[in-house]
Image: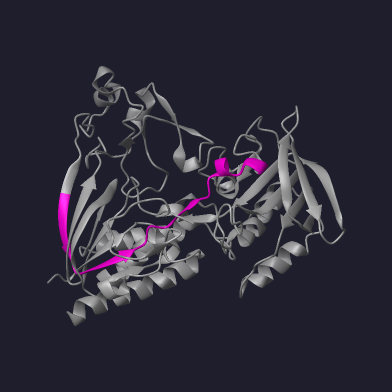
Amino acid sequence: MSNSILVLGGGFSGLTAALEAAEVGYEVFIVEKQPYLGGRVAQLNKYFPKLCPPTCGLEINFQRVKKNPKVKYFTLAEVSKISGGPGNYEVTVKIKPRFVNNNCTACNKCVEVCPVERDCEFDFGLGKTKAIYKPHTMAMPMQYVIDSEVCTGTSCAKCVSACEYKAIDLEDKEKEVVLNVGSIVVATGWKPYDLANLTNLGAGQIKNAISNMQMERLAAPNGPTGGKIVRPSDGKEPQRIAFVQCAGSRDQNHLNYCSYICCMASFKQCTYIREQYPDAEIVIYYIDLRAPGRYEKFLNKVQADEKVKMVKGKVAKLEEDSEGNVIVTAEDIIAGVKKEETYDLVVLATGMQPSLDGVELPLDAEIKEGFVVGGEDKGIFAAGCAKMPLDVMTSAETATGAALKAIQTLVRR
């Protein structure tokens, strides 16, 4: 029997679950497929409703991880096999090569000589990095990583020559480790619903119609524009902005559930725009407004802004004019009309799709629409957005609950 716990996912929920268990004495293994810990929270500009940056919460957790020998983590890692049962699971983990070892000091000399550029997935394609790159400014581990799909390898090797710490190994190979754990916490998080699926909203082909997570990156100081909100097509400062709610949510052809946080994310992003452009006009197209609990005060604050207009009605389509402006065709249910309006920038409030949706995971638990809805009788517990659409605070609460249940599984065996 094992007294260890496996946590699938190293985002905010996964970190919370791991630390809650480790700090009462249990060994925990975090398996994270990205090259860094922190998950989606690391990509945000600010939390709501206090509008503080994510750096504070993540850094506290990173320090807790560093100081606790009970927490061990693997990045660029995915579970390939799980066998056994509660109290005695054998888990096989495959770890992709990073090509950069622990000697890395993040000095950036390798980046300076790298000749190859790639789209930055951390910025949702709005920015570029070199083939060797630091995932983001506060990444943990603070090590560079090489994208093997674009790197030319030993035929170039300029980064190897530039690194005086011998931190780069272009011959690095995939590794495999086998873990013995007694229970499993699934904290695999979420992904933004793919704009390519939204054909009536431009299918991601309208340059100045961006997702809400792309807006987060534009507004973030460590984002592709240094925090300046501008149009991706031409760098123009937008003066007329529209938010399209439920972009892919509450739709039987896409995500048939409410994604919970989209309304609040748009209200928060209204404050980003107002800080930079005091005279900008903002229109929010919505089906219903959702501001649960204490968030209603935040909604009231945004509604009090004279330059924010809220239109109850479904957006039928988006089109692009010759100058890159976005034409929105939408109904206004209250006024009883359907009309076209032109905007400099449109933000699509895309839904939260669980990361497990469409992914086969060797997990003996019931999964519906990507959410883990069963498995507790087998010592498998969901946390955060692997369980349901949630905000950061509630995700952390579910992670604490999952950690407690995971411990109880060990104690009872």
Residue 9 appears left or right of 1: right
- For image coordinates 39% across by 23% down, the residue present is 116
* Residue 186 magenta: yes
Answer above or below: position of 225 versus 39: above
Quadrant housing residue 181: bottom left
Q: Is residue 242 visible?
A: yes
**Quarter containing the C terminus:** bottom left
Stretch in magenta: 177-200
* Residue 228 magenta: no
- For image coordinates 48% across by 70% down, the residue present is 394
Q: Position of residue 3 (x, y in %)?
A: 17, 71
Answer above or below: position of 250 versus 218: below
In this view, the residue farthest toward the left is 1
Residue 228 appears left or right of 390: right
Quadrant housing residue 323: top right
- For image coordinates 59% across by 38% down, the residue present is 204
Q: Is residue 280 visible?
A: no
**Quarter containing the N terminus:** bottom left
Q: How many marks?
A: 0
Residue 335 appears left or right of 19: right
Q: Position of residue 369 (x, y in %)?
A: 46, 59
Q: Report the front residue among 244 and 108.
A: 244
In this view, the residue farthest toward the front is 252
Q: Position of residue 19 (x, y in %)?
A: 31, 67
Quadrant housing residue 269: bottom right
